[in-house]
Image: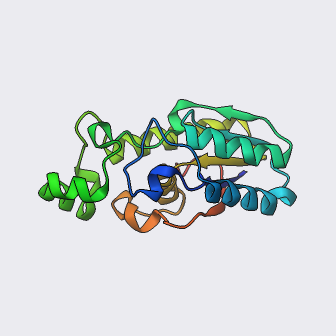
Amino acid sequence: MARVFLMQTGRTTFEEQSRIESVAGAPLTPQGVAEVQEQARRLADSEIDAVYTSQGEAERQSARLAADILGLKVHTTSNLREIDYGLWQGLTLAELKRRQPKVYRQWTDEPMSVCPPGGETMREAGDRVRAAVKSIVKRHRDETLLVVLRPVAMGLLRCALEGRQPATIWQQVDCEFICRGYETDGKNL
């Protein structure tokens, strides 16, 4: 059984502006850097064996900060990336709500039923992230891992690990920086 710590990336410039951020990503703010460093220091005694993340800017930056504190190298896989919001990337939530009020309401009420134009559904993103973590856990049986994710990717993975329905994604996405640990053999993914 692997022990997997999920760490949310630190706060980014897009989050400060309430912008929708997906694949491309944005850099961490000074607060985001401090958040990651604080959580990594808290994990220093957890005997982490490997750090994984995707190629997004906030993910790479957060993982590198944590890995430096933990004395590890970062492994990347594109399948850990945040949901692809397509044409919504970079919009503020207020802009999306104003431009597409019905779709915005559906997205907040029934997130699994919406696909942003040119993007991917929550279900597709969740399937991709779960498969990536299942593969990582298979390679690292009986080891302790740190997986650094953006908020929605992390929320989708938490739904799977906690046995929650993906439709509850908005209750799983924390606005505050978090790091949580789980034990898994990958079968619940």
In the image, is 110 to the left or to the right of 4? left
Q: Nearer the viewer, residue 31 or 167?
A: 31
Front residue (pair 46, 39): 39
Residue at point 29%, 43% (across, down): 88
Q: How many marks?
A: 0
Whole-percent x, y for residue 98 in the image: 16, 57
Question: Please, is residue 91 above or below residue 35 in the view?
Answer: above
Residue at 67% x, 60% y is 35
Q: Return the x and y of residue 6 as percentages of the image width and height.
A: 63, 54
Q: In this orientation, which residue lies closer to the viewer: 96 or 1?
A: 96
Q: Residue 91, percent across and down?
A: 30, 48
Q: Is residue 72 visible?
A: yes
The quarter of the picture where residue 85 lies is: top left
Q: Is residue 122 left or right of residue 148?
A: left
Judge from the rendering whether residue 44 lies leftward or rightward of residue 75; answer left or right.
right
What kind of colouring is applied to the model shown? rainbow
Give coordinates of residue 153: x percent, y percent.
48, 49
Q: Is residue 152 visible?
A: no
Residue positioned 60% across, 54% down in the render: 10
